[in-house]
Amino acid sequence: MKTAVVLLLALLAQAGGNVCLSAGMREMGAASQLGGPAMVSLLLRGLANPTIWLGMGLLGVFFGLYAATLSWADLSVVLPATALGYVINVACGAYVLHEAVPPARWAGVLLIGLGICCVSWSVRRPALPGRTIGDPCRPR
Amino acid sequence: MQTALMLAILILCGALGDVSLAKGMKQVGALPTLRLRALLVLGRKMVRNGAVRLSLLFMIADFLTFLVVLSWADVSFIVPATSLHFVLATLGAKWMLQEHISRVRWFGTILVGLGVALLALP
């Protein structure tokens, strides 16, 4: 339960961070060219943009929470669960931004959901001698 | 050929970054509470941990490679290809972190990888 709550907070922070970075980049306008001086100018304008800082802060929160989750749960459980972030993005696109989502993308959402269910089920199912129900990691 | 090589580097760096971070965090120890003091102590231990620092290097390399590949290949091709990252990192968890991965967990991981690949198709 603790893993699910912290991961959900991490994914929300990641989604918020991506939205802020995207909004910040749009506020700055598109780079006219990809030369050195243009990139330096873009970087300096980015550092002066509070939305970009907010986005980077939220992505930092994501990294911290993701790392904290890995301190007590198996990588083979946490990593597939992070794919829920893709589902959040598609759902936001469909229901908040009213974007058209093709059937193949909904099929992808379904597969990710099924995959996460399988991984969660494997955590609850004791498969090793000496392991107790609900213990995601090796016996310590 | 150039794209395939960069994609391989991208997937490898992402997987190694996750495996190194998981290894480092297991060495650092589990976070007891979500209080500020505990978070600061954990953060200090993370900064001093070699595996966590290595994971940051891999993640930076992963991000920079992603940007480079984006400059010559379509994102609708890159993202499905990088969904292999889920399978590779799980292999790393099995071999490098000695995690027990049941058939159900493998099946779930492969479903997630396929789902991510489908999401990115045009």
Image (cartoon, helix red, strand yellow):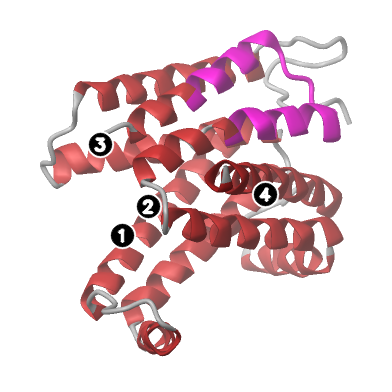
Q: Amino acid at mark 2?
A: Ala
Cα distance, mark 3 to mark 1? 14 Å
Q: Are marks 3 and 1 on the same chain?
A: yes
Cα distance, mark 1 to mark 2? 6 Å
Q: Is residue A99 left or right of residue B5?
A: left
B40 and A75: which is toward the camera: A75
Q: Is residue B77 above or below residue B94?
A: below
Q: Position of residue A15 (x, y in %)?
A: 37, 52
Q: Position of residue A118 (x, y in %)?
A: 54, 15
SS class, disc 4: helix
Q: The magenta stretch spans which residues?
A: B85-113
User: Marks 2 and 4: which is nearer the front?
Assistant: 4
Q: Position of residue A73 (x, y in %)?
A: 70, 36
Q: Is residue B69 magenta?
A: no
SS class, disc 2: helix
Query: Residue A83 — which label?
Result: none
Q: Is residue A124 left or right of residue A116?
A: right
Q: Which residue is mark 4?
A: B13
Q: Chain of mark 4?
A: B
SS class, disc 3: helix
Q: Evaluate if marks 1 and 2 touch, with contact meaning CB atoms under 8 Å apart.
A: yes
User: In which image quadrant can residue B43 be found?
Assistant: bottom right
Lower sequence index among marks 2 and 3:
2
Please identify the residue farthest to the front as the structure is shown: B1
